[in-house]
Amino acid sequence: AAIGALAQRWEREKALVARIGELRAQLRGERPGEIGAARLLALKDELAALQGEAPLSPLEVDAQAVAGIVAGWTGIPLGKMLKDEIRTVLTLEGALRERVLGQDHVIAAVAQRVRTARASLDDPDKPQAVFLFTGPSGTGKTETALALADLLYGGGRKLVTINMSEYQEAHSVAGLKGSPPGYVGYGEGGVLTEAVRRQPYSVVLLDEAEKAHPDVLELFFQVFDKGVLDDAEGREVDFRNTIIIATSNLGSGAMMAACLNRTAQGLPAPAALEELVRPQLVAHFKPALLGRLKVLPFYPLNDAVLAEIIALKLARIGARIARNHQAQFSHDAGLVDAVLARCTEVDSGARNVDQILNGSLLPAIADAVLARMAEGEPIASIRVSANKQGQFKYAIK
């Protein structure tokens, strides 16, 4: 009986929505009169009274209607989705600090910018945020972008990475927005516009922006100012729900010299660090571009921060082993120091750590694990240690 009543109500709502649509079409074609406007208002009132708080056939397909459909598909109540999004934004700073170490000033600025945008207090016709991350390699610039995509948009696949070193010629701008009519590649879409058209809710990473031709960078003026960009086919691509991050290594030498052999308490203030790199930024980028970007310098990583990063990455390895092999992973206290001692490339930062773990530690573990799997023997635990010479030792049970 309840289903029958709902079906009848849905039919009545659908009929009213159709009549309102027809009347609207009639009124558009002629000068609206009092009778027609009054009739339209009466129909809307009748529909509102019938629908109550839970319309079955919405008059307008708005964000609330779409969210309601998604809630029906996923089984997650609409209110919970909205509350979870707000909670994610409010706790964003803490979540980012767990993934990006040694850059608290950057995390605080990024989180504040996102909160302002999500509270609908900023210009709605611009991207959610536009940043320029500058500093040495391996300091967390890319990791911050990846973490934002993961936390705000649901996963690393929501990170659109554009290698700007591939756009060093003025004509290469066609690669970003698509080839013009009559040229090879017309209709295939641009790397940038096609990616954002398909994923309008994403983080766009413009990696090594200083290597792009100035004419290519001017393409982004429209994106930063209006939140949209027309591709080569004339389609408007919406960037208003994206976070755009440009990265640059400009000023890295000066930053490393200013931070060399200093403790965390003795480092220059973020504002002083920005002033330090600004002359190099101004010499390379046009003032009109810099004026549209929030510049955030990343500190070079000292040994204490690198040690924390090593411990964090080892914990992630342990989590993967537990998830994929149901085995416990552990290591002795000297392993972190042994990995740190191998980080000899000063200007590579945390990328040193990835190279050591992926190139030395993990391959040996993989060989041992595969040997046990080939024999059909279960794996209960994996322990890694380092001897006095810094060589890795493994014990698998």
Image: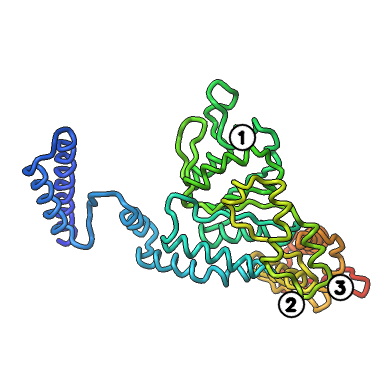
Name the disc covering residue 173, or none.
1
Task: Give x and y (percent) for residue 231.
Answer: 51, 35
Closer to the chain start, of discs 1 and 3, is 1
- Residue found 70% across the figure and 48% down from its top: 208
Q: Is residue 371 above or below residue 181?
A: below
Nearest-to-viewer mark from 2 and 3: 2
Circle 1: element type: helix
- Name the side, left or right, on which 120 lies relative to 220: left
Amino acid type assigned to the residue bearing label 2 in the image: Gln
Where residue 165 sits: x, y (%)? 71, 42
Locate residue 274, reporting x and y percent: 68, 61
Q: Position of residue 141 (x, y in %)?
A: 67, 58
Tag in front: 1 or 2: 2
Tag 3: amino acid: Ala
Quarter of the image for residue 395 reads bottom right
Mark 1 vs mark 2, CA separation in Å:
44 Å
Instruction: Please name the residue that numbered disc 3 is placed on.
Output: 386
Q: Secondary structure at mark 3?
A: strand
Measured in 3D between alpha carbons, the distance from the residue under mark 2 to the one under mark 3, in whole angstroms, is: 31 Å
Snapshot colouring: rainbow
- The residue drawn where x is 56% and y is 54% is 130
Given the image, on which type of amino acid does mark 1 rest? Val
Question: Closest to the observer: 74 or 382?
Answer: 74
Could you say which is closer to the camera, residue 131 or residue 330? 131
The residue pinned by badge 2 equals 265
Secondary structure beneath dot 2 equals helix
Q: Between tags 1 and 3, which lies in front? A: 1
Whether pointer 1 and pointer 2 mark residues with C-beta atoms closer than 8 Å, the reply is no
Please identify the quadrant where the N terminus is shown.
Answer: bottom left
